[in-house]
């Protein structure tokens, strides 16, 4: 943990907000990797969404009771988000929990949900605590009409049929801890295989990965299954991707979009977004915005439309390109190969 992270961990939430605001106002944040030679002709902006509904919260240490509420909020927000992204012509990588491809499921004869899937051992990490019961104990084993927070095949169809060509990415089948410690390789392989199979039934090929809760691991399995890239926090907020030791493209994560806990105004949020975009333009680097579709209604109605308009204006003036994760990975690999071939 760096000096800044250690200092920040000692602050109250209020003081964290004050510190972050100071860094933004003074131009110390976002940090851009200005020393690297960019292969891009202009800045690149990426949007990715953690499309997970109730699955993300069922073992949460702080939000377990909100699981279905969060899922239903995503269901309410996604049509609005799709309209906004279509209005401004902006594609998104929708990192989708595999179970959401289902419109229904039922219990096996043994009384378990998805008994064909391996179960992790009990574990606890920074965000979740799974120490009793069955990994799929919250699965209602009904359908999207009776329990719409747990299934989303209909919403995936809306994403696919949108006027913008979005990307469907992977977020594992059951939103599990994907680390080597808590996810043995056979478990990772099964989760990925099931996601790939369900996606293929909708003529989707999965190329991008977002690790649930930042639980990085099982990179070998990703490579073997045809995944090409993943989202990752890096030293700099605005940075270049890189090709890791497994041949996968690690794409920098820049900023999560949602209402802050500090009471910031709409104007300050937009100023912050503007600073991120300006750094991407200046150094021809990647700015990667990510969000949960269950975002706060205030942010969705007041800030998100202005953010997308700002990005569209930058794109329209040829200052940036907007890419999905998969498109960026393909572009970066091509440019890297050209440089190495010289």
Image: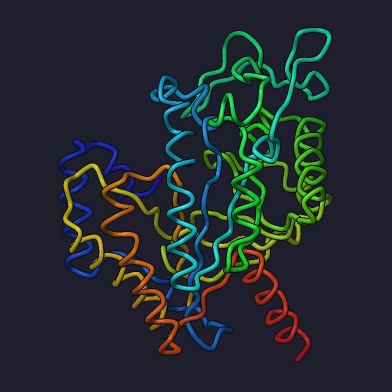
| Residue 160 picture location, percent across and down | 65, 58
Residue pictured at 48% horizontal, 71% vertical: 45
Residue placed at 19% from the left, 36% from the top? 12
- Picture coordinates of residue 196, whole percent (x, y): 79, 46
Q: How many marks?
A: 0
Q: Residue at image x 18%, y 68%?
A: 26
Look at the picture and state if 60 lies above or below 327. Answer: above
> Relative to residue 289, is residue 18 drawn left or right?
left
Q: Position of residue 28 (x, y in %)?
A: 25, 66
Position in image of residue 61 (x %, y %): 43, 22
Asked if residue 288 lies left or right of residue 335, the reply is left
Q: Nearer the viewer, residue 196 or 5?
A: 196
Query: In this rendering, is residue 68 above or below 319?
Result: above
Asked if 261 appears above or below 109 in the picture, the reply is below
Position of 168 relative to 136 (above/below): below
| Quadrant, the N terminus | top left
Quadrant of the image for the C terminus? bottom right
The answer to which image quadrant residue 314 occupies is bottom left
The residue at 70%/72% (across/down) is 330
**In this orientation, which residue lies closer to the viewer: 290 or 302?**
302
* Farthest residue, direction front: 145
Colour scheme of the rendered structure: rainbow
Q: Is residue 278 left or right of residue 15?
A: right
């Amino acid at each position: 943990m760096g000096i800044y992270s250690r200092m920040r961990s000692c602050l109250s939430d209020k003081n964290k907000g004050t510190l972050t605001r100071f860094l933004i106002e003074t131009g110390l944040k976002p940090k851009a990797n200005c020393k690297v030679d960019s292969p891009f002709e202009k800045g690149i902006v990426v949007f990715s969404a953690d499309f997970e509904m109730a699955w993300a919260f069922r073992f949460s240490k702080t939000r377990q009771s909100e699981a279905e509420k969060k899922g239903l909020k995503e269901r309410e927000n996604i049509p609005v988000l799709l309209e906004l992204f279509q209005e401004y012509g902006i594609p998104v990588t929708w990192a989708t929990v595999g179970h959401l491809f289902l419109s229904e499921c039922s219990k096996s004869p043994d009384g378990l949900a998805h008994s064909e899937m391996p179960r992790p051992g009990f574990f606890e990490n920074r965000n979740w605590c799974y120490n009793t019961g069955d990994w799929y104990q919250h699965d209602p084993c009904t359908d999207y009409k009776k329990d719409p927070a747990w299934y989303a095949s209909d919403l995936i169809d809306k994403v696919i049929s949108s006027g913008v060509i979005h990307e469907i990415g992977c977020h594992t089948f059951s939103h599990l801890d994907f680390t080597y410690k808590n996810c043995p390789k056979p478990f990772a392989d099964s989760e990925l295989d099931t996601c790939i199979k369900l996606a293929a039934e909708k003529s989707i090929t999965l190329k991008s990965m977002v690790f649930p809760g930042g639980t990085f691991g099982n990179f070998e399995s990703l490579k073997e299954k045809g995944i090409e890239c993943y989202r990752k926090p890096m030293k700099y907020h605005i940075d270049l991707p890189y090709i890791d030791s497994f041949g996968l493209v690690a794409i920098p994560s820049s900023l999560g979009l949602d209402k802050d806990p500090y009471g910031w105004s709409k104007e300050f949020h937009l100023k912050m977004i503007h600073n991120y975009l300006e750094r991407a333009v200046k150094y021809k680097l990647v700015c990667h915005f990510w969000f949960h579709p269950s975002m706060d209604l205030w942010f969705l109605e007041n800030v998100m439309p202005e953010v997308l308009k700002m990005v569209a204006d930058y794109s329209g003036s040829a200052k940036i390109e907007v890419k999905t994760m998969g498109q960026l990975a393909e572009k970066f690999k091509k440019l890297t190969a050209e440089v190495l071939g010289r």
